[in-house]
């Protein structure tokens, strides 16, 4: 049944200003334009109003008022999402978490931290490392994305291959339900089987079930040593095939990234820097870390043997700290560089790592048939390949037809290989039409019932996940 939403009136603006203060209720066109976009394609849905609360109590008041008037509310973090999760597709209120930006405590005795959702991920990582601890989730947008958004999408990044993703470091949260009720699931313990795990249910729910207002993280000791290896290959398939062999050798890298030549060239041009072996058909960027330098040297030697057996053209050890930083900067900049070339659609496919060669071959074959340019890169160590489809010179109608058909075939291939259609970007707005490729009608129906139990009025981030 289609729901009708209320529009924001002058009386609503007055009520919102009473809750959060005049300076934090914004209706000018420029602000609404900024908060009507994220990093997803060229989509834009300006909200009717941007509201910037300071704490959970204010958020509870906003949601109670919105619920009474059936006004849609779209939570927003740093606006770096790639599936349209923060887009206010039904107008209403864009609820910015940017003022909830405190690192409340870093507990070095228990290896834990308590933070608010508006904290920038990189800022948090740096403060944690200054205390000799480590928070591994490491999205490419870490310099601007916020921790609350990382929880909403269950962000991963390069180091997920060894250390896991965001959900693996969350012990508990404080969150406001769409009804205005504040809940605090989870606890400061590593074991907890006290009923359903509401914390983990809310993580990855893309802001559709609750608004997170505090996060309790677990941390781990900071590894003392790191080494980075860059391996060049002539063929994409050889690079992809080497990935599983590295793990079969008994090595678990802290990062194992895959980049085809077009991705490397895009980053070089965008950053005006030269990537080692930039003309190679594909490259693997491999990082190992630990507390014993000698053990890492042995792992690097073993990696070199493995990749040479897969036809590696060159194996380069980035020994200097600055060289390591430069290579990481180039890798982190690939996404932005690729997207600057053309209108695009980015897919977030993930398969068991041994199926990477089949996925890469299939993507190239499918895109070739539809005459769509594709550029692949991503987190090969955990089977997560970002497939970018570029419009290039296609006219609008041909682009929409070809890209949709290609995406459907790519997702069907991904599922047939035992994979999933999103590893870390989420379904959001841009991918919701494809969810039935991955999930059964019964699974989708169950998810919709969970959504309705949390949000009976349907006001929180409507228009996401479900078509």
Image: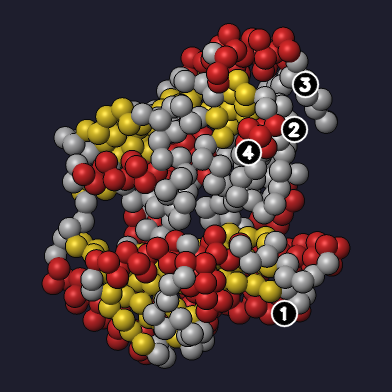
Q: Earlier in the sequence, mark 3 or mark 1?
A: 3
Q: Residue beneath label 4, please?
A: 34
Label 3: few (<14), some (14–19) or many (≥20) C-alpha neighbours in 10 Å: some
Of helix, strand and loop, which one carries label 4?
A: helix
Question: What's the CA distance linking mark 4 and mark 2?
Answer: 16 Å
Q: Earlier in the sequence, mark 4 or mark 1?
A: 4
Label 1: few (<14), some (14–19) or many (≥20) C-alpha neighbours in 10 Å: few
Q: Earlier in the sequence, mark 4 or mark 2?
A: 4
Q: Residue at x 22, y 33 (%)?
A: 107
Instruction: Say which mark, if any, is on residue 368.
Output: 1
Instruction: Say which mark, if any, is on residue 90.
Output: 2
**x, y percent for residue 31:** 63, 32
Q: Residue at x 28, y 74 (%)?
A: 318
Instruction: Say which mark, if any, is on residue 7.
Output: 3
**x, y percent for residue 283:** 44, 78
Q: Are marks 4 and 2 in contact (CB under 8 Å)?
A: no
Q: Residue at x 44, y 33 (%)?
A: 118
């Amino acid at each position: 049944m289609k729901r009708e939403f209320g529009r924001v009136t002058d009386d609503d603006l007055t009520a919102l200003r009473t809750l959060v203060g005049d300076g934090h209720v914004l209706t000018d066109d420029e602000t609404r334009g900024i908060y009507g976009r994220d990093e997803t394609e060229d989509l834009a849905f300006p909200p009717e109003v941007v509201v910037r609360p300071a704490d959970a109590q204010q958020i509870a008041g906003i949601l109670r008022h919105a619920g009474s008037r059936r006004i849609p509310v779209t939570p927003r973090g740093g606006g770096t999402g790639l599936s349209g999760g923060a887009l206010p597709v039904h107008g209403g209120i864009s609820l910015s978490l940017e003022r909830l930006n405190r690192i409340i405590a870093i507990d070095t005795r228990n290896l834990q931290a308590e933070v608010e959702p508006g904290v920038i991920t990189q800022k948090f990582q740096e403060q944690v490392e200054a205390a000799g601890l480590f928070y591994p989730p490491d999205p490419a947008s870490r310099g601007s994305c916020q921790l609350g958004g990382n929880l909403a999408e269950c962000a991963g990044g390069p180091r997920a291959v060894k250390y896991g993703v965001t959900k693996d470091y969350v012990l508990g949260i404080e969150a406001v339900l769409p009804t205005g009720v504040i809940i605090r699931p989870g606890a400061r313990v590593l074991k907890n089987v006290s009923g359903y795990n509401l914390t983990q249910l809310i993580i990855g729910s893309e802001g559709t079930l609750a608004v997170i207002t505090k996060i309790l993280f677990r941390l781990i000791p900071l590894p003392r040593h790191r080494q980075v290896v860059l391996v060049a290959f002539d063929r994409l398939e050889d690079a992809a095939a080497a990935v599983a062999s590295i793990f079969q050798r008994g090595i678990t890298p802290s990062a194992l990234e895959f980049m085809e030549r077009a991705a490397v060239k895009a980053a070089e041009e965008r950053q005006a820097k030269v990537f080692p072996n930039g003309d190679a058909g594909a490259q693997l960027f491999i990082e190992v870390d630990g507390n014993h330098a000698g053990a890492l040297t042995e792992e690097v030697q073993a990696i070199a043997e493995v990749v040479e057996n897969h036809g590696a053209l060159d194996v380069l050890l980035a020994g200097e700290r600055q060289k390591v930083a430069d290579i990481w900067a180039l890798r982190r900049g690939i996404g932005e560089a690729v997207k600057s070339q053309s209108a695009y659609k980015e897919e977030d496919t993930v398969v068991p790592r041994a199926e990477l060669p089949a996925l890469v071959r299939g993507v190239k074959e499918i895109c070739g048939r539809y005459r769509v340019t594709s550029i692949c890169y991503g987190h090969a160590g955990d089977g997560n390949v970002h497939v970018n489809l570029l419009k290039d010179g296609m006219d609008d109608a041909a682009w929409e037809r070809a890209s949709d058909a290609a995406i459907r075939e790519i997702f069907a291939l991904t599922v047939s290989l035992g994979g999933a259609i999103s590893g870390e970007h989420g379904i959001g707005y841009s991918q919701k039409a494809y969810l039935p490729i991955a999930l059964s009608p019964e699974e989708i129906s169950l998810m919709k019932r969970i959504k309705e139990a949390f949000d009976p009025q349907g006001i929180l981030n409507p228009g996401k996940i479900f078509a």
